[in-house]
Each structure stands twice: as C-alpha cells, then as structure tokens.
Amino acid sequence: MAESMVEDKPLSILQKRWRKFRTLKRGWYSFLFLTGALLLSFLNPLMINNRALIVRYDGVYHFPVLSGHIEAKELGQHVIGEARYRELKSQYREEGAGNWVLMPPYPYHPNENLLLEEDLPGPPPHSPTSNHWMGTDDRGRDVFARLIYGFRISMLFGLGVLIGAYSVGIIAGAILGYFGGWVDILGQRFVEIWSGLPFLYTVIIISSLIRPEPWVLVLILCSFTWMRISFYVRGEFYREKAKDYVAAAVSQGESNPSIMFRHILPNGLTPIISFAPFGLVGYISSLVSLDFLGFGVQPPTASWGELVKQGLANINEWHLVLFPLGAMFCTLMMVVFIGEAVREAFDPKTFSRLR
C-alpha cells in the first residue's frame, strides 16, 4: 500500500519540466557535454601544462605542477632557471639511472613560447603536427592549449555576467512591478537614462585607466545588461500580483519581500529561465568582441577573441582561422540548443501552475 502511494505521488511542475527537458535530446546532450567540458576544464593544469606532474630524481619525488618553480640544477639538468621537463624526460630516459618524469597528457602550456625550446621549422605560425594538434600561433604558442584554456575563461565569464546581470535585473524588475506607481515611474526613467550610456566608450575609458581584469569586465558588462531582464520581470510581477494567491498572502500578513520572492517570483520564472541560455551566448560573444578589439582580457591570457584576431591577421594560415572559429561556433550552437530545449520545456502551454 505504501509503495503504491509513493508511486502515485504527483510530480511538481519543476519535475515535469525537467523530465520534458531530458526528452529533448539535442538540448540534453548539449547540456551534458558543455557541463562536463566546463567541469573538466578546472583540471587543465593537470592535463595541459608544460610542468611535470611527478618527477623522481635520486629516489626523491617532486611535484612541480603543485609546488611551482623548481630550479633545473635541483633535478640534474644543466640549464639556467626552471627545469625544462620535456627535455628532462628525454635526458632521464637516455641516462637509464632509474629517474623518470610523468608529464601531463598534453605537455604544453598556453603561454609557453615554443620557439625557445623546440626545433620548429621556420617562423611562426606553424601548421598542425602530431605534437601540436592545432599548430602554433604567430608567437609560437600552442593553439590547442590556448583554445582549451580560453574555453574556461569564456564560459566562466559568460556565467558570471549571467548570474550578476540577472540578479540585478530580477531585483529591479520585482521592485518596479510589485510596488508600481511613482516607484515604477521613477525607476523606468532611471533605466532609460542608464541604458543610454555608451557601453564601448565606457570600456575604452576604463581600459585606459586600469588593467581590465576579467572580474572588472564582468562588473562592467553586468552594469550594462541587467535592464533587459528587468523589463520581463516587471511585466511578470504586474500580471501575477493581481491574482488571488497574492491577495491571500497579503491577508495573512506576510512581508513584501516574502510575497515578492517566495510567492510571485517562482510563478514568473519562465521568461527568466528561457532567456538565460540565449543571454549566455550574447555575453560570450561580447567577451570575444572586446578581446578582438583589444579591450578584453589582457595578454598573455588565452582568449578566443585574441585567436580570432590572429586568424584575421594571418588569413592564409587555415588553422588559425578554422579552429578558433570552429570552437566558437560549436560552443555557441550547443548553448542555443540548450536554450531551445529549455524554452520548450518551460512553455506555459505545456505545463501551467494554474491547471
């Protein structure tokens, strides 16, 4: 009897929408792939790096990827400065003294100038080889390593702006839509004035004064992109606050913040969640555009916009054009697939709270 009651327990509206989202294979598989790739990107230092994971020398184990800079002479290598672990691995193999080096699966760093350590044919950029899967850029750095590190920066930047802008937009829209009257009139005038500020000029001025770190760019973009979502939230609050459940909450003496964010907001999440993936596409594209113009993350940080700029400057080097643009296209296309699936899963015609 108890088992049948558990089985017959009705699903919540969120569970129904989640099940619907999982049936939309194109969006579901894109979501799994991008989520897995983003989580895996936090292990980049262990997978794509020119520092060894483990070095065994004279019976002592060293962990350069964790400890950082290790002088070459401490590991028996006759060079000045930090050890060169790829060369050290070959040296230990030739000596046959029981010493060994465990390198990451892809033993190149995105900011490493390969011209100083490898015998590359001619001046950069170089075409793809078995060692450098996507070739090198015009400064002799590995393109594959820079693409993978740039993916993490782009995704985290986009998610950071999404969370910041949507948080501000939801709060502002909730206040304007719930209180209405003079609060709404004055708030709307402020939004109109603020949205008229020139975004690009502001970034140029700030870039000329300070070094634009990624978190600074996140704050700047958040301050210019929260207005759009505030319009949708304002409209949802105007519609929802006239319904009976809001009047019931008011009659019970609940506070305004409780009514706004415990009762009204959960019933007005459909446009917020539906537009979020498409907003993420716009934020990633904004970072790429700023990097391309030279106002984004500063060198030598790996970024997709900088690689696209190199492709334009070296249009005859096919690998500098194909791989960065291909990575951007595939990533943004999967985000759009996720957005389409979310929009269909949250369609109020399919699952409504009022049924």
Image (cartoon, rainbow, N blue to C red):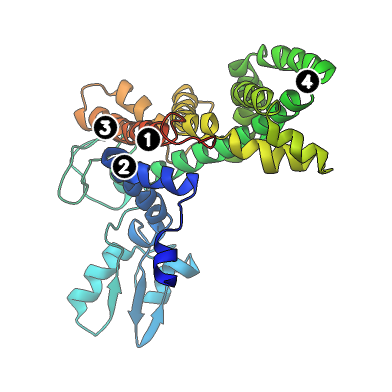
Distance from disc 3 to disc 4, alpha carbons, whole Å, reads: 47 Å
Q: Residue 190 or 327: which is nearer the viewer?
A: 190
Mark 1 secondary-structure assignment: helix
The number of discs equals 4
Q: Residue furthest bottom?
A: 59
- Are the two marked residues, 2 and 1, in contact with CB atoms closer than 8 angstroms? yes
Image side of residue 342 versus residue 206, left or right: left
Q: Mark 3 points at which residue?
A: 326
Mark 4 crowdedness (10 Å alpha carbons): few <14, some 14-19, many ≥20 = some
Q: Residue 345 or 320: which is nearer the viewer?
A: 345
- In the image, what residue type sits under mark 3? Gly
Q: Residue at x 68, y 40 (%)?
A: 263
Mark 1 crowdedness (10 Å alpha carbons): few <14, some 14-19, many ≥20 = many
Q: Mark 1 points at which residue?
A: 335
Distance from disc 1 to disc 4, alpha carbons, whole Å, reads: 35 Å
Q: Which of the marked residues, 3 or 1, is nearer the chain's N terminus?
A: 3
Position of residue 114 measured from the top left corner of the image (x, y, whole percent): 31, 48
Image side of residue 162 versus residue 332, left or right: right
- In the image, what residue type sits under mark 1? Val
In the picture, which quadrant includes the N terminus? bottom left
Question: Residue 180, labelled with which disc?
Answer: 4
Q: Name the residue under label 2.
A: 30
Res. 212 in view:
no
Q: Residue furthest left?
A: 130
Position of residue 129 measured from the top left corner of the image (x, y, whole percent): 15, 45
Distance from disc 3 to disc 1, alpha carbons, whole Å, reads: 14 Å
Image side of residue 271 versus residue 258, left or right: left
Q: Is residue 33 above or below residue 318?
A: below
- In the image, what residue type sits under mark 4? Gly
